[in-house]
Image (cartoon, grey):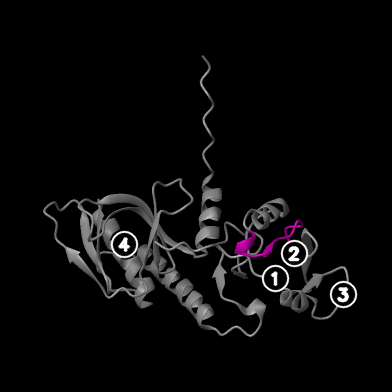
Amino acid sequence: MEMPAKAPKPAPRLIFQERLRITALPLYYGGFLSVRYPQDQYFMQYWTELRGTTLFFYSDKKNTKYIDKLDLINLMSVADINPAQSSCAMFILMLPDEEVEIKIDDPERGEEWKSFILTVRELSVPPSGSLLPSQVTRLREVLARERKRRAALEKPPSDPFSLPVQEVPSQDTPHHPEVLYLQCFYAVSRKEAVEMLEKDPTSGNLILRPGSDCKNYSVTIRQVIDAPCIKHYRVVSTGQAYRIDVDKPVRGYFFVIWKQKLKLCLPIQLSK
């Protein structure tokens, strides 16, 4: 009897894009962690990613949807534990309402995990005599990205297009690695943008995406007037600014349709 074909595994890039879309946070560090909450008797191992100041826990390395998360913005301290076996690293994340134990099989990886966590929490690279120069350089790069992200979050919006931004790594936007995009930016095709807006209209109805010419951008919106309608508009660089091509070149057009309940398409954040 012929065996059924196995479902193809998602490519690493697609996994990265989907996790970025769901979390809306830049990836700083990742790896396997064993975690134990106060109410748990045993450690549970997760593929873990540090995005912004949040740890996202996945059941495995290929899963795109996280099963739990831990916000570190109120982290008070990280306390080392000296386990009986010296072949692993253990420490406690001291939070205001709970203490979460972390275990890593490799002591060097454990030191690196602590350093990344403290860097994004304290906004400074912690002193460590065991890290290599290349690791310190990477911490400084993460520090610069996190400071920029925090500054954008703290900036009061003066118009719809000055909302908090997220940094999209260069591997997802090869033509524009230097640009900071709005949180509604997704490296998706025209067809994928339509599918996203139709799949869950409550998440938003405006997406900024790469243009078909791979040089400019496009805006895809979903409006409900008499019936749901999808429209696409080109966003063209003029050198020092961007121009939105519309059917009727009316000044302030997008600010007008914004008043008609257009909303940035943002990922849904699920609580624990």
| Location of residue 220 with respect to 62 vertically, above or below | below
Q: In the image, 135: left or right of 197?
A: left
Dot 2 lies on which element?
strand
Dot 1 lies on which element?
loop
Q: Which residues are magenta?
A: 201-224
Foreground mark, 1 or 3?
Answer: 1
Tell which of 225 and 127 is nearer to you. Answer: 225
Task: From the top left corner, tell me how far across and down residue 203 is, in percent.
Answer: 60, 63
Q: CA distance from mark 1 to mark 4?
A: 43 Å
Q: Please state, as top left, top right, bottom left or bottom right, where the C terminus lies in the image.
A: bottom left
Task: From the top left corner, tell me how far across and down residue 191 is, in percent.
Answer: 71, 51
Marks 1 and 2 close (CB-CB < 8 Å): yes
Q: Earlier in the sequence, mark 4 or mark 2?
A: 4
Which numbered dot is residue 223? 2
Task: From the top left corner, tell me how far across and down residue 53 is, in percent.
Answer: 40, 69
Residue wearing tag 4? 112
Which numbered dot is residue 249? 3
For badge 2, the amino acid type reads Gln
Q: Earlier in the sequence, mark 1 or mark 3?
A: 3
Q: In the image, 218: left or right of 60?
A: right
For badge 4, the amino acid type reads Glu
CA neighbours of label 2 inside 10 A, class few (<14), some (14 to 19), many (20+): some
Q: Residue furthest front?
A: 226
Q: Earlier in the sequence, mark 4 or mark 3?
A: 4
Dot 3 lies on which element?
loop
The residue positioned 70% from the left and 72% from the top of the image is 261
Dot 4 lies on which element?
helix
Residue wearing tag 1? 262
